[in-house]
Image: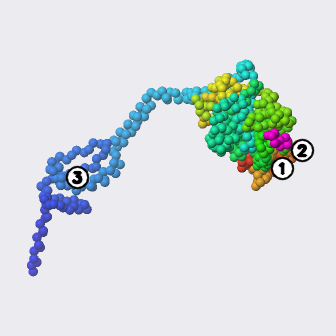
Amino acid sequence: FLFPPPPPPPPPKKFNFNAASFSFNPAASSFNPAGAKSVAPPPPPPPPPVPPPPPPPTPSPAPAVEAAPAEDPVPEPVPEPVSEPIPEPVSEPAVEEVEEVTEKLEEVAISTPVPVAAEEAPADPVEDVAAVAVPVVVEEPPPPVDEAAVMKAYEALLADDPRDHYNIVFIGHIDAGKSTLAGQILFLTGGVDKRTIEKYEREAKEKNREGWYMAYIMDTNEEERVKGITVEVGRAHFETEKKRYTVLDAPGHKNYVPNMIQGACQADVAILVISARKGEFETGFERGGQTREHAQLAKTLGVSKLIVAVNKLDCPSVCLPGGKWDKARFDQIVTGLTPFLRSCGYNIKKEVTFLPLAALYGHNIKDVVAKDNCEWYDGNSLFEILDGMEPVERNPLAPFRMPIVDKWKDMGTVIMGKSENGFVRVGDVLQIMPNKLRVKVEGVYRDEKETNAALSGENLRLRISGAEETDISPGFVLSSIKNPVPVVMQFEAQLVIVELLEHNPIFTVGYKSILHIHTAVEECEVTKLVSEIDPKTKEQKRAKYIKSGGICVCRISIEKSVCMETFAELSALGRFTLRDEGRTIAIGKVMKLPKIH
C-alpha cells in the first residue's frame, strides 16, 4: 500500500523592501528579513549610555549602518522609556571619582585661609555690645542737672518778664455766652482790630446770627459758625499790666465734654458763665445740664479759682424798665449755685467770686459797669479780679512734667501741653513716657513767641528731636530722665460717687467706665472695694457696693499703661474723673501706686 508523498513545504516568504508598509510583532524573539541573508547580522544593541564613562565604539561593518534606516524607525520608541530610569547603575569608578572630588573639596575647605568675617568671630560678644550701643546715643546716662545753671536761667527769665501767668478756661452750659465773652476780652485788649469785628458782624448777619459776631473771634471753624456750637477748645492769649493770660474756650454741648476736659485740665482759673435769661439758667442747672457737670469737672481737674460770671443781665426778659440790671435775678442765681458749689468742694469765701456782666457789649469786663446800668454792684471788674489773684508758687528745681495735649509736624516734631512742674530750657534732654523715648528740646514757644526757657504753669509748644510724630499720642507725659513720671496699670484711689446711671445704680467690683486723668483717656475697671468712708465721721468700713453720693477707697485697673502721680506728690497728675455713657459718675484722687512701676 503506497501513501501519497507529503506536500512540499511552502516557499519561505520574502521580505519586500519596496512595500508601502509592514507590520512588526514586538513579542517575536527575533526576525531576519529574507533579503538580508547574505548580510552579516547586526551586532546586539549596545547597553544604554552611562553618563560618566565614554560611549561604546560604533560597530565596524558599514552595511549595518545602511540597514539601520529600515530598522531604526521601528525600535525608536523602545529605548526612550528605558533610557531615563536606567541611570541608577553607576559604575564603581564613577563613585570613586565622586568620593575623591569630595575629599579634595574638604581638603581645600580646611586648607583655605579663614576669611575676615571668620577671624572676627571670637570678638563677636564685645563688638555686638558696641554695635548696639552706638546707634542709641540717647540711652547714655544724661549729665547731672546743674542746679546753679537752672537757677541762673530762671532768674534771667523773671528779669525779662516778671509777670505771672494764668490759664483761664471758659465753661458753662451751651449758649451761655462763653465764646462771646472770650472774644470780647480779646477785642478789649487789642487782640482783634475793629475792621475784623465789622467783617464778623456782616458774616453773622448773613447767617441770621446777629448776636454771635463776637463768638466768631474764637469759633474760627466754619462748621462751628454755621451751627453756633463750639466743638474744639479755642486758644488765645492776652496781657494786662500785671499778668499774662492764656484763654481756653471750652465747648458747652454735652456731646463734647471730653474736649471740655482737655481744656479744663490745662487751666488754673475757670470762669463759669451763667445765662441770666429766664429759663436758660434753670435748663443748665437742672439734672443733665452742663452747668453742674462743668463745675464738678473743673474742681476735679485742678482749677484753684472759680469766677461765676452771670451773663445777659441786659436781656429784655430779665432787665428792669430803663435797661437796668435786676438784682433779684442775680441773687436768685447766686442762692441757687452756692450750696451746689460747696458740695463740689469749693471754698465759697476764698475760691469763688460772683460777678454780673454783659459780654456782648463789654460791660463790667475791662471797666466797672456804669451806675446807670447797675447801681447795686460795688465790686471789681473781671480784669481787676483776675489781676488781684495771688501768684502761684513755681519750683524750678522740681522734676519736669508736661502732659501732651497735641502733636504735629512742623520743621520737626512739635508737642503742645501745659507744663505742670519744673523748668524747661532749650537743649534739655527729656523723656517721653510711657514709651521711654529720649528727646532733645530744640525750641520753646510761649504765647506764640520763641523763648529760651519756660516755667511751670505755662501753655507751651516744644520742638523736639529724637522722636517722630507717630511715636507720640495725647496722654503721654514729657518728664525728666532722673525722676521719670510713674507708669502704672493699676492704682488705689479715693472716689466720690457723683451720680450713677439709672440702669446701673450700684458701684461695685467689676464696674467698667472711662478714666480721664490729665490728658489721658483709657478704659478701666474696679477690681477691689477697699472700704467705704462715712462723709460725717470719716470712718472707714467694709462694703460690697456703693450708691450715688457715697465715698469709697477702691483699686482700679487700666487696660493700658498710664502716667500718673499720687495726689500728694503732684495734684495735677493725681486727680481724675470716671465717666460712663457720656455722664460723669465719679471724681477721685490717686492715693497709692504700686511699688514697682
Instruction: Say above or below: 227 vs 439.
Output: below
Q: Residue furthest bottom?
A: 1
Which residue is denoted by mark 1 in the rendering?
543
Q: Quadrant of the N terminus?
A: bottom left
Q: Which residues are magenta?
A: 320-331
Which residue is denoted by mark 2 in the rendering?
536
Q: CA distance from mark 2 to mark 1?
A: 17 Å
Q: CA distance from mark 3 to mark 1?
A: 107 Å
Instruction: Give the residue type that dot 1 points to.
Output: Ala
Instruction: Say above or below: 345 vs 438.
Output: below
Q: CA distance from mark 3 to mark 2?
A: 121 Å
Counting other residues with Cα less than 10 Å from the Cα at mark 3, is it few (<14), some (14-19), or many (20 or more)?
Answer: few
Task: Tell which circle, 3 or 1, labels the residue nearer the N-terminal end.
Answer: 3
Q: Indicate yes or no whether the magenta region holds residue 329.
A: yes
Q: Which residue occupies the foreground of this view, 301 or 70?
A: 301
Seen at 75% across and 30% down, the residue is 166
Seen at 79% across and 40% down, the residue is 323
Helix, strand or loop under label 2: loop
Label disc, if present, on residue 46 of the rendered structure: none
Helix, strand or loop under label 3: loop
Task: Tell which circle, 3 or 2, labels the residue nearer the N-terminal end.
Answer: 3
Question: Residue 180 placed where, x, y %?
Answer: 71, 38
Q: Which residue occupies the foreground of this view, 577 or 88?
A: 577
Q: Quadrant of residue 187?
A: top right
Whether residue 169 appears in this view of the structure is: no
Seen at 24% across and 51% down, the residue is 45
Task: Tell which circle, 2 or 1, labels the residue nearer the N-terminal end.
Answer: 2
Which residue is denoted by mark 3 in the rendering?
44
